[in-house]
Image (cartoon, grey):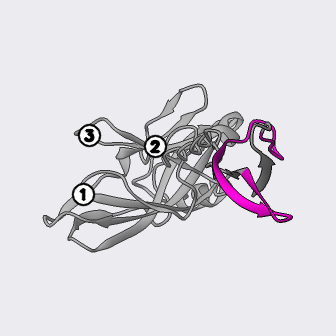
């Protein structure tokens, strides 16, 4: 509260502060004096507008070519199946050739120099109510430059524990191997892929190599 003589200019401790004044009569030293009493008005501080920080970008969808499904992850590949790529092994060429040796029904020749077999072990679970068969030929390999290995199975001939997913009922799982013959130079730049035959949507899987 500030006291001042009538007619005197009112003062404030803060420059530009708003005040409210009124005149009153007070006895000072035995004499009546006309005084002006001023009160500072409370003001609400003006807040500067705040800028809302931008939301973090959404994580990329798993299963794309740039963000493939990691080894061991179980994902839905279409309306009827879920798939897990359990492991990929590029070191089974000699074992496959030995497995084929002496098989009268296997006419496939060993890979030429610069080529080899690649085994991938997969797990498939049926989610639809109707039993169905999943063909290993639905699984392909692709290189980073877009070349496709789409001859899973036939190019390898006979091999160990092939995937057999015939008449799989809802909730049942089939586990087995899928095989491709590939150029050894492509080994470190391959992804496995599945394309939904109804929607054309493609899911890519890392081989972990």
**Circle 3 SS class:** loop
Residue positioned most to the front: 30
Q: Secondary structure at mark 2?
A: strand
Distance, label 2 to label 3, CA atoms, is 12 Å
The residue lying at 24 percent from left, 63 percent from top is: 166
- The quadrant holding residue 111 is top right
Quadrant of the image containing the N terminus: bottom right
* Dot 1 or dot 3, earlier in sequence: 1
Percent across and percent down for residue 157 are 46, 49
* Residue farthest right in this picture: 29
Q: Nearer the viewer, residue 203 or 10?
A: 10
Residue 23 belongs to the span the image colors magenta: yes
Instruction: Give the CA distance from mark 1 to mark 3.
Output: 12 Å
Q: Is residue 187 above or below residue 136?
A: above
Residue 31 horizontal side relative to residue 184, left or right: right
Q: Position of residue 48 (x, y in %)?
A: 65, 39
Instruction: Kindly identify the residue that appears in the image at 79 percent across and 53 percent down.
Output: 3
Q: Which residues are magenta?
A: 10-34
* Mark 2 / mark 1, whichever is N-terminal: 1
Residue bearing the label numbered 1:
80
Please state the horizontal and vertical placement of residue 97, each as a whole percent of the image. Answer: 59, 54
Mark 2 touches mark 1? (CB < 8 Å) = no
Q: Is residue 18 magenta?
A: yes
Task: Give residue 117's position: percent from left, percent from top.
Answer: 59, 48
Residue 94, placed above or below residue 144: below
Q: Residues within 10 Å of mark 3 (few under 14, many from 20)?
A: few
Q: Report how far apart the C-alphas of labels 2 and 1 lie in the structure.
A: 16 Å
The residue indicated by pointer 3 is: 197
Q: Quadrant of residue 91?
A: bottom right
Question: Which residue does the numbered mark 2 point to in the structure image?
Answer: 193
Q: Secondary structure at mark 1?
A: loop
């Amino acid at each position: 509260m500030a006291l001042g003589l009538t007619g005197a200019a009112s003062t404030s401790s803060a420059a530009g502060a708003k005040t409210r004044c009124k005149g009153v009569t007070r006895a000072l030293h035995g004499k009546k004096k006309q005084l002006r009493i001023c009160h500072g008005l409370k003001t609400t501080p003006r807040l500067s507008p705040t800028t809302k920080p931008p939301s973090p970008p959404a994580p990329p969808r798993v299963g794309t070519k740039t963000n493939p499904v990691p080894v061991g992850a179980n994902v839905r590949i279409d309306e009827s199946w879920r798939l897990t790529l359990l492991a990929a092994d590029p070191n089974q060429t000699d074992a496959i050739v030995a497995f084929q040796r002496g098989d009268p029904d296997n006419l496939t020749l060993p890979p030429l120099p610069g080529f080899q077999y690649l085994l991938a072990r997969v797990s498939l679970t049926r989610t639809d109510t109707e039993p169905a068969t999943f063909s290993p030929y639905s699984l392909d390999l692709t290189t980073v430059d877009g070349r496709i290995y789409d001859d899973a199975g036939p190019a390898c001939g006979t091999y160990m524990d092939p995937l057999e997913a015939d008449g799989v009922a809802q909730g049942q799982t089939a586990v087995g191997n899928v095989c491709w013959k590939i150029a050894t130079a492509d080994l470190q730049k391959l992804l496995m892929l599945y394309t939904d035959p109804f929607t054309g949507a493609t899911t890519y899987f890392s081989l972990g190599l």
